[in-house]
Image (cartoon, rainbow, N blue to C red):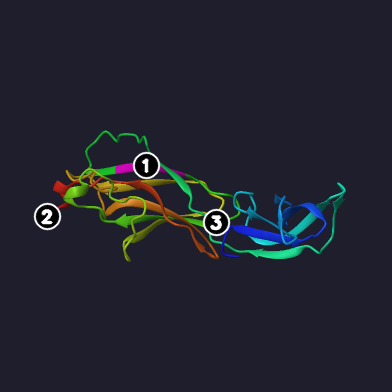
Amino acid sequence: MKTTKVELAAKAPEAASVAFTVEASDGSRAGCRSTKATDDVWSCTIDLLDGGIAPGELTASFEVDDRAGRTLHDLAPARPISYRVAPPRPTTTFKVLPFEDPGEDTGMGTERDKITWTSPAGYATEFRLYGVVGCLQSSRANDGKPCLVEGMSLPAGSLELIKKARGDARSMTLETEYTASDACGLMFWCGDYGALVMSAYNAHGHSRFAIVASMDVCWACFGP
């Protein structure tokens, strides 16, 4: 399977309704019920992600409520389902943490940032934080707007890996030293990154990139 949704169907001529169940090896379950048939075929769709089912080997089964009001079980063997999908995109937040002032001008600055995210359990084996090189939206028309917005493509070579986290992690803290200058604030840590993005990974691929944070276009600063 390459999708989180699975359509289940069974032929049951004497049924009044059919209930389908998908079960994982850890006992977690998701189900749906069909109350209308087409040519005696009853079907419904389960979204395994919404149902809290993690990727793995699953089984699908059904039971029938007949027209006499009885519930009939074990009418067919449970069917195996191999559920293998890339993780969904994480939902992220970015916060600059307070940092103690050293009290002397060293020409260096330090910033502490905390990134948190939500992601369903069992999908990701790793999360990766990347810096996006440059301000990709830099133009006079976009002055004051974010360097990166939803729907933009990331050019080849524009991503640089900053940090990885385990699949069960839901936060990371960065402590970054940079050389202070009048240009500070235009890019993250006075460096090359106009935005930060994160993706969730497993053996079957990776999620769409989530925009963690973005600087704003300063046309007078970035433009010719």
Q: Residue at x 51, y 54 (%)?
A: 88
Q: Give x and y (percent) for residue 170.
A: 52, 46
Residue type, numbered disc 3: Ala
201 or 72: which is nearer to us?
Answer: 72
As helix, strand or loop, the secondary structure at mark 3 comes to loop
Which residue corresponds to the image point at 14% horizontal and 47% vertical from the top-left? 220
The mark closer to the camera, 2 or 1, is 2
Q: Which residue is mark 3?
A: 124
Residue depicted at 36% across the width and 54% down the height: 151
* Residue that carries the numbered disc 1 in the rendered image: 112
Marks 3/2: CA distance?
42 Å
Is label 3 in contact with label 2 (beta carbons under 8 Å)? no
Task: Tell me the element at label 2.
Answer: loop
Considering only order in the chain, which callout, 1 or 2, is on the residue closer to the N terminus? 1
Q: What mark, if any, has residue 224 been given in the picture?
A: 2
Task: Give the quarter of the figure containing the C terminus.
Answer: bottom left
Instruction: Give the numbered dot on residue 129.
Output: none
Q: Residue 11, position in %: x, y?
A: 76, 62
